[in-house]
Amino acid sequence: MEAGLYKREITFDYPALAGWRWPTVDIVGQRPGPRLAIIAGVHVNETSSIEAVIRLQRALDPAKLKGRVSIIPIVNLPAVPLRSQYVCPLDDKNINFSFPGRPDGTFSEAIAYALLNDWAHDAECFADLHGGDLCEEVSHFMVVQRTGDADFDRRNLEIAQCFDAQIIASIDPSHMDHPARSVTGRAKRGQYAAFAEAGRIGLIEEAHVAYHFEGLLRLLHNLGMTDNAPPKQREAVIITRYHWVPGPIDGFYRYHVEPGQKVAKGTLMATAENTYGETIAQVTAPEDGHILWRITHALSPKDSFIIGLGTKD
C-alpha cells in the first residue's frame, strides 16, 4: 500500500461471521517499519478506548510515520444495538475471554480467531483497549501475559510500560491453558501485545481517553514508528496475582475502596446491606494488594464479582 490513510470495511470467511462487515482504518507511513494492530470495542460501552482510537486516526501523519497502523474501532458489532455489557448477544459469550478462538466456533470464538490469525497475523504488536463498562470503574492498569520465556516476557513488559499505568498485572503462564484475553492468545503465538484498561460507567472522560491515546503514542515510539512521544508521569506497581472477588450474598453493596488504591490484608472493601439498611455481610481484602477495579452498581447477586484485586506472590 502507498502512504496514506485508508478507510474500508473488511469481512472474515468463517461461518459464524457471515454477513458482518467491520469498519477499519489503515495509516500507512511513507517510510518502512513494523505494523501495529489496534482494537477497541470488544466491550462496546467502554467508550474511552473507542474515543482514543478515533483520536489516533486524526493525529497520525503518514508523512511522519514508519510502517503501518491498523485499527478496528469496534469489534463487538452485534452488541451495539443493545449496549450489551461484556458479552456478544449472538452467543452470550465474552469475546474478551475467547482467545485464541476457533475458526468453526461461535461468533465470539470466530472473531477472536480471525483477529489473531487473519487480520493481525503479521503485526509486530497488537494493542487491545478496554475500560469502564456501564457498572464498573477501573484503575489505569495493564495486563501482561507471562510465558516463562525470559526474553519474551521482558519485551512484553516493556510494551506494557509504554502506558502510564498505576498497576501492571503480570499474569501466570497457566492462563495459556484456557481461552483467555487477546494478550494471552498472542503470547501463545509467540507474539507481543498490549492490553490496556482505563475508564468508568461508559463515559468519555479526558483522563481515561488520554491514558489510552498517549499510551499508544508511546508504544508507536517504542516500536520505532514515530520520532516523539509524550512523557510518562509514574512507574507502575507490578502485581503477579489477579483476584476476582465475589459478593458473598445478595445485597445492596456500599464500597469503601477506589480503583488504584493500595489496601492491606483485612481492609474493609465493601459492605452488603439488605433492603432495610441492615448490614448482612462484609468483604475484606484477603491479602495486601491494589484495587484494579470495582463495580459501581449497588445491587449485586451472590457470587457475582464486585472487585478486582491485584497482589504479589
Image (cartoon, rainbow, N blue to C red):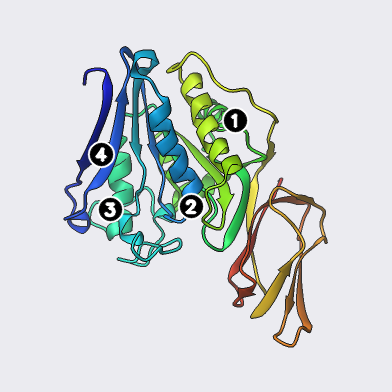
Quadrant of image for the N terminus: top left
Of tags 4 and 2, the one toward the viewer is 2
Q: Looking at the picture, which amino acid does disc 3 mark?
A: Ala
Residue in the picture at 61% in, 68% down: 297
Choose top left, top right, bottom left or bottom right for residue 55: top left
For marks 3 and 2, the one nearer the N-term is: 2
Query: Badge 2 is on which residue?
Result: 46
Residue 118 shows which numbered tag? 4
Residue 104 is left or right of residue 214, and the answer is: left
**Looking at the picture, how far across and down is residue 148, in whole percent?**
54, 35
Q: CA separation, marks 1 and 3?
A: 30 Å
The percent coordinates of residue 37 (x first, y second) are 37, 33
Q: Earlier in the sequence, mark 1 or mark 3?
A: 3
Residue that protrudes farthest toward the bottom in the picture: 276
Among the two numbered marks 2 and 1 on one chain, the one whose residue lies closer to the N terminus? 2
Q: Disc 1 to disc 4, how far (Cα)?
A: 27 Å
SS type, badge 4: helix
Badge 2: residue crowd in 10 Å (few <14, some 14–19, many ≥20): many
Instruction: Classify residue 154 by image quadrant.
Output: top right
Q: Name the residue beneath numbered marker 3.
A: 110
Tell me the residue that label 1 is attached to. Answer: 161
Which of the 4 image quadrants contains residue 40? top left
Residue 145 visible in the current orientation: no
Q: How crowded is the residue under tag 4: few (<14 C-alpha within 10 Å), some, or many (20+)?
A: few
- Which three-letter amino acid code belongs to the residue tagged 1? Gln
The image shows residue 64, relative to residue 58, as above or below, that is above
